[in-house]
Amino acid sequence: MLVSDTTRFLSVGRQLGVLDDKTTKLTFEQVRRRTDFVPSRSETFQYGYSSSAYWFRLRITNQSLENTKHWLIGLLDASSIDYADCYVEYADGRVEHQTGGLKRPYVDRGFFATTPFFRINLLTNEPVTVYFRIESSAAMFGKVTIWEEYYNLSKGRVIIFAIWMFLGLFILRSLNSFVLARFVSNRHFRFYAVCTFLLYLATLARTGIYPILLSNHPQLLDWVPAGMGRLMPMGLSVWLYSLLDNRPILRPPRWLLLAIAGTSFIGIFLSLVVQNAFIGQFFAALVLLTYVLFFIGAGIIWKLGPRTALVFVVPIAICTIPFSLYQLQSLALIPYHPGISQLALLALALEMVSMSLVLGRIVQSYIKERVAVANALIQEKVEVDKLQELDALKTQFFTNISHEFRTPLTLILAPITELKERYPTENVLTLMERNGNRLLTLINQLLDLSKLEAGHLKPVPEPGDIAGFFRALASAFSSLAQSRQIHFVFDQSETGWWAFYDRDKLEKIVTNLLSNAFKFTPNGKEVRMMVRYPHEDRVRITIQDTGIGISKANLPHIFERFYQRSPDAVDGQMNRAYEGTGVGLAIVHELVRVLGGTIDVTSQEGIGTTFTVSLPLVPVLDPPDVVTEEKIEHPIAANIASKQLSVALPSSDSLTDVASKELLLIIDDNPDIRSYIRSIFDADYQILEAVDGQDGGLPDGHSG
């Protein structure tokens, strides 16, 4: 070949002689004596995954008028060559040997970005013979080119700068995706970031970056090109697996993708042990199969969804098309063309741009979501403020109306008390007084609730014998227990225990719990109150009944204000005898909290309920030696106990006296109502009472 003045890269492919070294053992001395070089018929060379080494021979004569002798000869686009050797034989018999290739340390080789190149000195009109030897476990393709070193120096610098800048963008792009995956919560983006990170690592394996980084580690340098190349099918298959959901129609491709990922993972470590053309060809086919599955998966996602994953398919599809052509070229299924590699680089650049748009869309969607959440929080705050305002109005209303009720109620109860003292035999006065006191108790409870909500109730501890206090409280319920034939057991571990405690709040807690225990316990059963002092600064009160129990559905709500049990307590229906206002236990819970204690409840339907209250105490340092019997100064416990007293039914003797009168059956679940109606008709009728229709002998569905 003759070279002359030119500013272009000269392709010398058709001037080459080619020798196929199937043994890979031929030395330069043996090759220079061979006469069986075959003339090349193409400007390019293309060898699929081959176990052979290939020798190129080229004779060059410099006829440049500029008398330039510094030339470069290289293998353009031959980025997958593991070992490249250049032997330059001059007219005087001198031979220069230069080395290159991906598996050669950087200091031992010439490398122009992705192109192995070598320097040769071409004296004017002196022929030079150049021998190339190339060998690789991967596919080899490219073209042999020669150019004048200094004349094309500026152009070469631009190309070097452009290619290395592009490689730098590769690295930054992969690291950027990996970092963003940490902060962007979108699941598809995270898998996409991992996929592109592995894709770039695999792409960089066929560039000059790893030999620079691993020059001092030849063992790693021998593994990196093949091992890193396995990352591409593994990353792409895992990412595509994440896009397909678990519908039955998609399970076969999902399992196939997992198999590809697993095989690629094994291939990474297999390349540490063995590398040959067959294994390389197998994994190249595996990559091609992954690309085919990608396009099938993209079609499935387009047809069946999820649509949210579709935006991530486009950037990868941009890369997949030229990469598929590259793999077909590597397997020698299509002819080599330099434009395919350039198209792959362009596709990676377009992927960066398109992914930026996708990321912008994710950020925009995230901002919209944040704005929607912020608006929802604002709306929720407005609703909460409205509810708080309504709650405050409700509390103020209850407070005002309760105060308004107490004044006339006091004016009613006081005369009734005086009349009862004048006419002790009038049962209707007793009835009026009992229900008046009941109404007063309810009003006081509402006032307590309003004070609790306003935070006005504070502990007011006073010194006293708390053990005597509990005995007095329990005795207030003894008459109720006797009237209903309930076995009431009071058990206290100490006869005397002096401490500071809040009498008023503690009485409300205990009386409400005992009232409920008697209320929900049928006649003839048992109620227990146990008081223990596990430490000198704590008291534990346990109130246990053997009543109807509380269902699991109702148990979490029993301390809520105005909450009443659902109708499931007695015979599948809620007997109105068990109904209340839903205030008592709410007050108990709040008072226990005010006193710094805890309250627990366990219950089993049909067996009973147990409340356990644990309260802190401040012991009296110098208590008296005598045991006192506390006297309750206010009527809370007495009123709560007395309102549950049964109204006695007429005896058999009285029924005999009025045998001549007509029979009147009064059915109502409230004993005071029955008593009042009885007082009206008692003079003219023989009266019988019943709690409900079944008790009164009426058919189902009838009641009084």
Image (cartoon, rainbow, N blue to C red):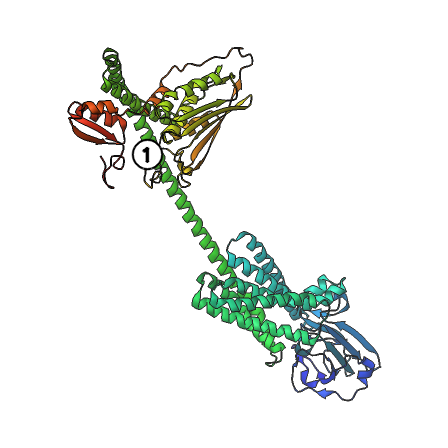
Place residue 42 in its image quadrant: bottom right
Residues 161 and 496: in front is: 496
Residue at horizontal 59 percent and vertical 60 percent from the top: 174
Residues 250 and 83: in front is: 250
Looking at the image, can residue 236 be seen?
no
In this rendering, position of residue 680 left or right of residue 347: left
In this rendering, position of residue 663 left or right of residue 107: left
Total numbered labels: 1
74 w.r.t. 373: above or below? below
- Residue 359 at x, y = what percent? 50, 58
66 w.r.t. 384: above or below? below
Q: In the displayed image of the protein, which residue is found farthest to the right?
A: 93
Quadrant in which the C terminus is drawn: top left
Residues 121 and 143: in front is: 143
Residue at horizontal 82 percent and vertical 83 percent from the top: 30
Residue at horizontal 34 percent and vertical 38 percent from the top: 570
Place residue 445 in its image quadrant: top left
116 w.r.t. 467: above or below? below
- Residue 265 at x, y = what percent? 64, 65
- Residue 486 at x, y = what percent? 39, 27
The residue that mark 1 highlights is 390
- Residue 404 at x, y = what percent? 27, 22
How many neighbours does mark 1 have within 10 angstroms: few (below 14), some (14-19), or many (20 or more)?
few
Quadrant in which the N terminus is drawn: bottom right
Looking at the image, can residue 575 be seen?
yes
**SS at mark 1?**
helix
Place residue 227 in its image quadrant: bottom right
| Amino acid bearing label 1 | Leu
